[in-house]
Image (tube, grey):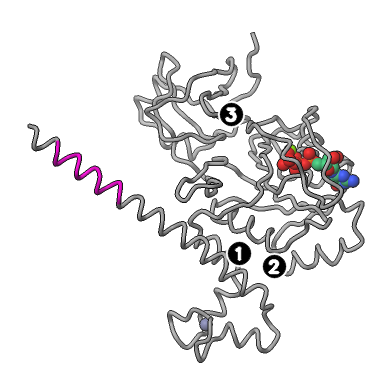
Amino acid sequence: MNLSKYSLAELGWRPFFLQQLSLDELESFQPARVFSVNRNQLVLRRPDAEDLHLPLPRKLAPLAPGDWVLLDENLRPQRLLERQSLFSRKAAGSQLQEQLIAANVDTALIVCALNDDFSLNRIERYLVVAREAGVQPVVILTWADHCELTHERVDAIRALDQNLDVLAVNALKSEELEPLNAWCSSGQTLVLLGSSGVGKTTLARQLTGQDLATGAIRLSDSKGRHTTAARSFHPLQAGGWLLDTPGMRELQLPAAETGVKAVFSEITALAEDCFFRDCQHQEEPGCAVLAAIESGDLDSRRLEQYHRLLREQAQHAASLSEKRKKGRELSKVRKTLIDKRQ
Ligand SMILES: Nc1nc2c(ncn2[C@@H]2O[C@H](COP(=O)(O)OP(=O)(O)OP(=O)(O)O)[C@@H](O)[C@H]2O)c(=O)[nH]1
Ligand SMILES: [Mg+2]
Ligand SMILES: [Zn+2]
């Protein structure tokens, strides 16, 4: 038998989850953490017990890796506990569907390579997703061994947010990753985010000591080949848990107005001084944001990206609320039909 040797606290259990249990649940239910989810199977990890492999429970909302569920005496999942944080993205190729990436994450390692693929716009996009999820971001720049602009690029990211932790590394060298241990201690949950080929699995190999598969990038354009497909947690050598994710060709934002406003906090602060309360910072007179661009205090790239991300998330938020409205109308029609039958 393959018993888990972890305690509840080591699996990431917190008072936040305990507080959600009723007295009855405390007596007869046990918590378990979702360690991986795929199309039809769920793996749950429990303290001092074997992992459970179950079909996806239909009565629970869609589950994400990292979720906590309560099991009844027959080890059937009965309830999903409220999440402390949730990462989602707009599912590729779909207008409406949101794809759950990970729940109850403490730190998001946003990975970007210091090669032709480097992009401040993309880092900002990931930062928005992290802030929206309520998760602390740490930016890791890989391929520092092949880059002559490392210092400039680190400075450019620090200029986005003075409090942001940024680390430039050669991901193949474990000693360069030691500063990351600060976020990896026992009970901590981390997720790796970034495009394909930036070195997420290379980092995961170093931090977990496991032999995970990586893939060579194309030399012509530094693009990866989408080597990682599954999503499941790996134990970190420093004690926590790490979720490696498949590289995303295009991370499309879910509804994320709060995240955008937080990542572009200097624009949010300037907007307080705009003449019009609902100023869109496009061409209005008395716009403090446009004045800051004029005087060189604000980079016009920042404002363009702010507008772009706000627009993108607004489109998704609008289509979601349309979908919910349609859902409500449909359930009203169903109810009327049922009422008529009775
Ligand atoms: N020289 C150098 N090579 C690196 C570095 N980081 C990653 N690589 C190489 O880049 C290639 C791609 O790395 P992976 O770790 O598979 O990338 P990934 O982000 O997991 O890619 P997907 O799974 O496709 O999303 C591998 O050949 C790595 O050895 C680095 O810092 N320096
Ligand atoms: Mg990978
Ligand atoms: Zn304005």
Residue drawn at (78%, 36%) of the image: 207
Q: Tell me: 71 left or right of 47.
A: left
Mark 2 against mark 3, which lies toward the viewer? Answer: 3
Please rate how many residues cluster around mark 1, counting C-alpha atoms within 10 Å: few if below 14, some from 14 to 19, many from 20: many
Residue 233: percent from left, percent from top: 65, 31
Counting residues from the N terminus, which is met first, the one under dot 3 or under dot 1?
3
Kindly indicate the quadrant of the structure image that contains residue 191. Answer: top right
Overall secondary structure of the magenta section: helix
Q: Residue 263 carries which label?
A: 1
- Who is closer to the viewer here, 228 or 165? 228
Q: Name the residue under label 2.
A: 160
| Residue 145 sits inside the magenta stretch | no
Q: Confirm whether residue 153 shows in the render.
A: yes
List x then y, in percent, for residue 214: 79, 35
Q: Nearer the viewer, residue 335 or 76?
A: 335
| Disc marking residue 36 | 3
Q: Which mark is residue 26?
A: none
Q: Residue 51: percent from the left, percent from the top? A: 58, 18
**Count of picture labels:** 3
Query: What amino acid is at disc 1?
Result: Val
